[in-house]
Amino acid sequence: MEKLKGGAVAQKPVPLDENQSARAWWGKELRNWRRVRRLSSKSLGELVQLSATYVERIEKNQRRCTAQLAAKFDVALDAGGALTRLWRYVEQEEQQEGSHADKDVTLPVVGGMEDWLSGRVGGIPVAYLERMSAVDRRKLMTLLGGLGVAATALPTGPPRPRQVRAEDIQQVRAASTTLSRWDARFGGDGLVQSAAEGEMARARALLELSCPPSLRQDLFTDVGRLAIVLGAAAFDRLQHDEAAALLELGCQCAEEADNWSLRASALNWHARQEIWRGRPEKGLTLAEVGLVRSDRLTPREQAMLHNARARALAKMKQAKEARVAISLSDDIVTQAKSLREEAPWMLFYDQAQHLGDTGHALFDVAMLAGDRTAVELARHRLESAVEGHTSEFARSRALSGTKLATLLMSTREPDRAAAVATKALDEVGRLSSRRAAADVVSLAQAAAPFSRRPELAELRARIGTVLA
């Protein structure tokens, strides 16, 4: 059982079947949000002037919710508009069930609602593709093909706009900002994945519409940014095929928008994913492609890509070259201007992030060469990263903390390592991040030589709990 705010003890929740309807799915998301905020049904009810029983029945789809009440829940749970946006699917399904609209306006459903919400199966109307020129059709299918999109019918619902509007792009932009923040704070699994799937489906639909020339660059920029955010989250879940497809889509959108900064972000994430997967040569290539025409990138963007190069080179056992890349990154980042002048997708790259990235690269160099200088540099940078990251970047702080503890274990400082690991495991335990859990496995391996020391018994138990 779990302690909630106000001292209440949460009972084991009754499993909810989100496949019954959009309303049931929304109720489950409401419960997920309540649990993330560690609120009892009574506490949440007080915030929206309802009884605890009524809140629970809405979650179980036993009582009706309204759009106005859904908006109240969104504000009370600080959901950033996610619950309000998801409510539109409830309205669409109920409008579809309650009316027999003109078949010339709506199209037949293929695959059921769960296909549309998943963001993995929904498709492009065949009639729309037939109206496109061969060049435009090829472009669209190239952009969406990596996500496994088929030429099928879209679900029914209210008549969709025929042309992209500025407010549509603004909604995609807001979703990217919110989901990026959730991913950094909570991890890419769970809640982020649930919200992300619907947002990608909606953004993808915009690429099917006619777009005024004045909005085209913004459309591709913001859809590309969302694809990168979701690709990074899929990488955090270790869903590598999905991540690669989304990051490739993000890169292609950036190129369509002629946005070199966004392209650098996509290639950086893709490089890091490939390095993590044990493909450092491919990761190195992607990072170096990102640095083509580096004069068009800000110092932070260049440093970010040089850090990816350093990680790749260290994994390729080229310690000297990795050190050179780190030194170059350090020199470049000193030229960086205020974060306020960076693109929105670069706001994460502060001093703590730079130290964490280079600290991870130096960790790989230290493990490769057994170099005490590299060990001390890695330790110092990882310690500074842990201290510098705010709660908004809880995952980065947890990753650097776990890596620091692993470094200390590997250099036979188990007592110091245990103190660092305890804090890092507290952080990892609050995340939904399979990547962070994988780092805990590496920590456990580094701690194995000290398994008989009784003072590390508590740490071994904590590691087991987190991995479970």
Image (spheres, rainbow, N blue to C red):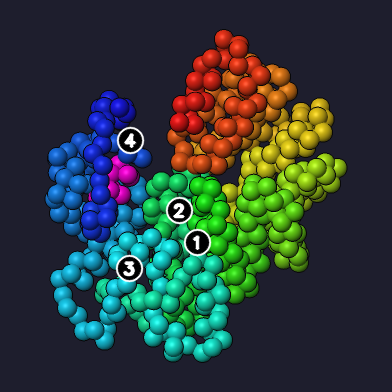
Check the picture and name the quadrant holding the C terminus. Answer: top left
Task: From this view, report whether residue 249 is shown above or below residue 454.
Answer: below
Q: Main secondary structure of the magenta part?
A: helix
As helix, strand or loop, the secondary structure at mark 1 comes to helix
Q: Amino acid at mark 3?
A: Gly
Q: Position of residue 64 (x, y in %)?
A: 15, 54
Q: Tell me the amino acid under the disc marked 4.
A: Arg
Q: Which stretch did the figure color magenta?
A: 27-34
Q: Alpha-carbon distance for marks 4 and 3?
A: 36 Å
Helix, strand or loop for disc 3? loop
Q: Can see residue 12?
A: yes
| Label 2 crowd (10 A; few <14 / some 14-19 / many >=20) | many
Task: Choose between 215 and 145: the one closer to the eye.
Answer: 145
Q: Which residue is mark 3?
A: 111
Mark closest to the chain's N terminus, 4 or 3: 4
Q: Residue 353, how many percent across, how many down?
A: 63, 43
Question: Which residue was labeled with disc 4?
Answer: 38
**Label whose residue precedes the other's in the sequence (1 or 3):** 3
Q: Which residue is mark 2?
A: 179
